[in-house]
Amino acid sequence: MPTQTRSLYAWFDDSARRYPDRPALDFPDHSITYGELRAAALSAATRIAAVLGTTPRRVALMTARTPEVFAAYLGVLALGAAIVPLSPDHPVRRSVDMCELAEVDLVVASDVSSAATLVDAGVKAPVVALDALGDFYENMGQPAPSWSANPDDIAYIMFTSGSTGTPKGVPIRNRNISPFLESWIAAYEVGPDSRLSQVIGMTFDASVCDMFCAWGTGATLVVPGRRDLHRPVDYIVDREITHWNSVPSVIAIAQGLGHLPEGRATGLRHTILGGERVPAQLCAQWYRVAPNTRIHTAYGPTEVSIMCTTYPVPADPDERIATPNDGTPIGRPYPGVEILILDEEGLPADEGELCLRGPQRFDGYLDATQNLGRFVSTPVGSAAAAPVDEPVVTADHWYRTGDQVRWTSGQLVHLGRLDDQVKIAGHRMELGEIEAALTRLPEVEQAVVLADRRSGEVELVAVYRGTPLPAQELSRRLRERLPRQMVPRRYRHVTEIPLNGNGKTDRKRLLLELG
């Protein structure tokens, strides 16, 4: 169990005071010390409060891997405010929706142009360009204000896909993230001499892990250059990375390009792979690339603070636990994380839906109505777990992940999704949100989006009824509303959507008809 609860900013600040001259950020052409980053963060905090005229509760930040963005990110947290990261690659309408749902007090845009775009798109909160907070080095040395955050304050808000077409806001509080950081740092032996990769986008919650597991220990966060992600082994070797954290797709892409030279990454100590299925074959290949590393799979929904289970993958293939999908187990829970597996009747079982609770579990969605159906009570005796039919969530309630798992040789094995959510390249999405975006097009009367897994990878296929449109046109218009990874690869026009015996869309039949 966690021994302390600190604010997310305090994890950084404690290290900055202890190791002011150690590198906190390492860029391809320069590094920034903890002392420099702390001074810049406090300066950014001062300017954010001055721009707004008061201390904000929630600030949206357009993210990028630049010193100014890292300083602004920390500056928001120093104010005791919650950070709401936005991606410059997402459609502006989606960013505006997130700002409205999170009820942000201020939006920090990448530049004047993106600020104007957000204003034109109707964002209600004040918008300021990042450069209004000043140059990173020019503003260092500003007096340090005395803001603070408490354990119950929200540290960050991430958005996941929502079945109604509206993203779901997931607020994670300081008391949720602190036990995760303690568990992760201890499990993977992070210390001041560690150098952590930073390959995960800042709108993905695992980026919080990279930043604050490094900054919480006096370690260095190694920021990649533009081409580094295509050649991860060169990035690891040239930048002396000790801890690699990514979705397995990053390694798989490099493997497909022939960029995984064997035996080179000898200094890599720990490799953490999660966010999607981790193929056993990929682990075998990575052990040949990094013979001294220890590979760990990691699993966890955004709602339970990034990751909550882990499995150390043995280097010897004969010692590994086989899974039905040629993957690897997701392992056992972190300290303090409680696990309950429910069968179809809602009774405890060795195989069924994974439910979670504990200090890492969030308190519920920003829109409390979205809590309905997502939590269950503890089953007592022969009585089944009862769905929580009220928006208010308590610590006793179990979060339903929608993931099917089973115990195998003392380890949890992930068997797939029980609902219409899928993960592609680590991004979780609900097919209903894509369907909702399709049916907003005037030519589309009805739409069903399928996750075709027959090739071994997840491919999104949209089946729709209405006026036929070219696939390129459909994709173009969907990209105005959805992130790239949520745009289907294939489309099929039909005159009728089939129903099964229960009167529901017959998805199995549609998949079979795809051929």
Image (cartoon, rainbow, N blue to C red):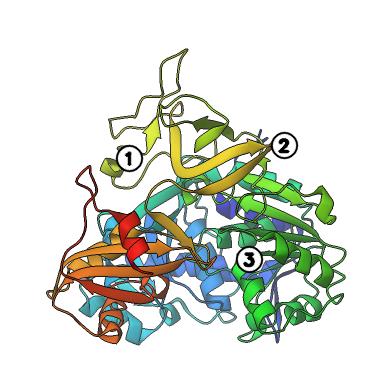
Q: Amino acid at mark 3?
A: Pro
Please report the residue visible at 87 percent of the width from the left and 63 percent of the height from the top. 292
Q: Is residue 512 above or below residue 14?
A: below
Along the line of sight, which residue is nearer the eye, 84 or 226? 226
Residue 230, image x and y in percent? 64, 82
Q: Is residue 440 above or below residue 328?
A: below
Q: Quadrant of the C terminus?
A: bottom left
How many callouts does the rendering have?
A: 3
Along the line of sight, which residue is nearer the eye, 405 or 27? 405
Mark number displayed over residue 248: 3
Mark 3–mark 2 distance (CA, rounded to whole Å): 24 Å
Left or right of 376 in this view: 239: right
Nearest to the eye among marks 1 and 3: give it: 3
Mark 1–mark 3 distance (CA, rounded to whole Å): 31 Å
Along the line of sight, which residue is nearer the eye, 94 or 374? 374
3 or 2: tag closer to the N-terminus = 3
Q: Quadrant of the N terminus?
A: top right
1 or 2: tag closer to the N-terminus = 1
Please report the residue visible at 27 percent of the width from the left and 53 percent of the height from the top. 506
Left or right of 115 in this view: 88: right
- SS of the residue under disc 3: helix
Q: Amino acid at mark 1?
A: Asn
1 or 3: tag closer to the N-terminus = 3
From the image, tell me which residue sits under label 1: 371
Mark number displayed over residue 409: 2
